[in-house]
Amino acid sequence: MTRELFREDSYLKTCVANITAITETGVQTDQSVFYPLGGGQLGDTGWLVTADGARIDITDTVMDRDTRQHLHVIQQRTTLSVGDSVSLELDWDRRYRLMRFHSCLHMLCSLIDAPVTSGSIQVDRARLDFDLKDPIDKEPITKALNDLVERDVAMSMRWITDAELDAQPELVRTMSVQPPRNAQGTIRLVEFKGVDLQPCGGTHVASTGEIGAVRVQKIEKKGKQNRRIIVVFEE
Ligand SMILES: [Zn+2]
């Protein structure tokens, strides 16, 4: 499996890696800073830089759920070989927006007392769907989100075992997305102290101040018992 450097440190922008496999759609490596599509968060993009300096576009990152190998999707033809040492460089501006949005959704989750049915983190907006019958207003949620940003609440991570999580099922807020369990039988908890604590494999900012000013753009009724809250950056 690919060593997931971004799980320990989401601020790593580049790493050296060895190619372990080349498929029709891309390149697998022994380790990576690229987050693979999952948990509602888009896969990372960026560049693979060869030993002789050629920059090859990585247009997406996906994970094979069985082997836990990450595939860096490459569209162009290359002369890469298994065993080559390459550099992987993130499109950091794009990834940082995804990090800010992901942390913002955890803030949103903390404000709405209802189960989350699905979520999506894009480059220009993020949304959560809640299993919620009653209508809600945009303005108070926008205000509460910005209050949490203003408070600059620090994020911390820790790892627990599958058994510990199974003993506390209330930690799992998202009905449709189960937290990623790894081969070691551990799960990462992401905590914004006093605000939100949940298992999550995504990439987060170090404290909520980095999210910046946000706005609830829209609240849509999706089905008879589902509210979709869409958040954008105020920029
Ligand atoms: Zn999350």
Image (tube, rainbow, N blue to C red):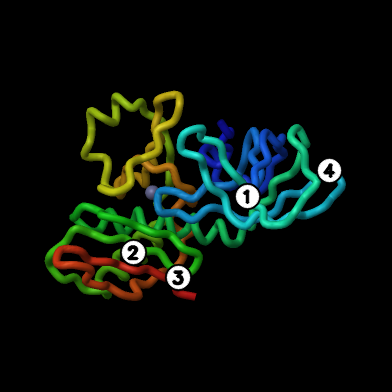
Q: Residue 79 vs residue 120: left or right?
A: right
Q: Are marks 2 and 3 in contact (CB under 8 Å)?
A: no
Amino acid type assigned to the residue bearing label 3 in the image? Phe
Name of the residue lying farthest toward the front: 24
Q: Which residue is mark 3?
A: 233
Residue name at image x 78 percent, y 43 percent: 80
The amino acid type of the residue labelled 4 equals: Ala
Front of the two marks 2 and 1: 1
The residue to which callout 2 is attached is 145
* C-alpha distance separating marks 4 and 1: 21 Å
Q: CA distance from mark 3 to mark 1?
A: 33 Å
What is the crowding at mark 4: few (fewer than 14 residues within 10 Å), some, or many (at least 20)? few
User: Residue placed at 27% from the left, 61% from the top?
Assistant: 129
- Gap between marks 2 and 4, in whole Å? 45 Å
Q: Amino acid at mark 2?
A: Leu
Residue 193 percent coordinates (x, y): 34, 44
Q: Residue at x 19, y 70 (%)?
A: 136
Q: Nearer the viewer, mark 2 or mark 3?
A: 3
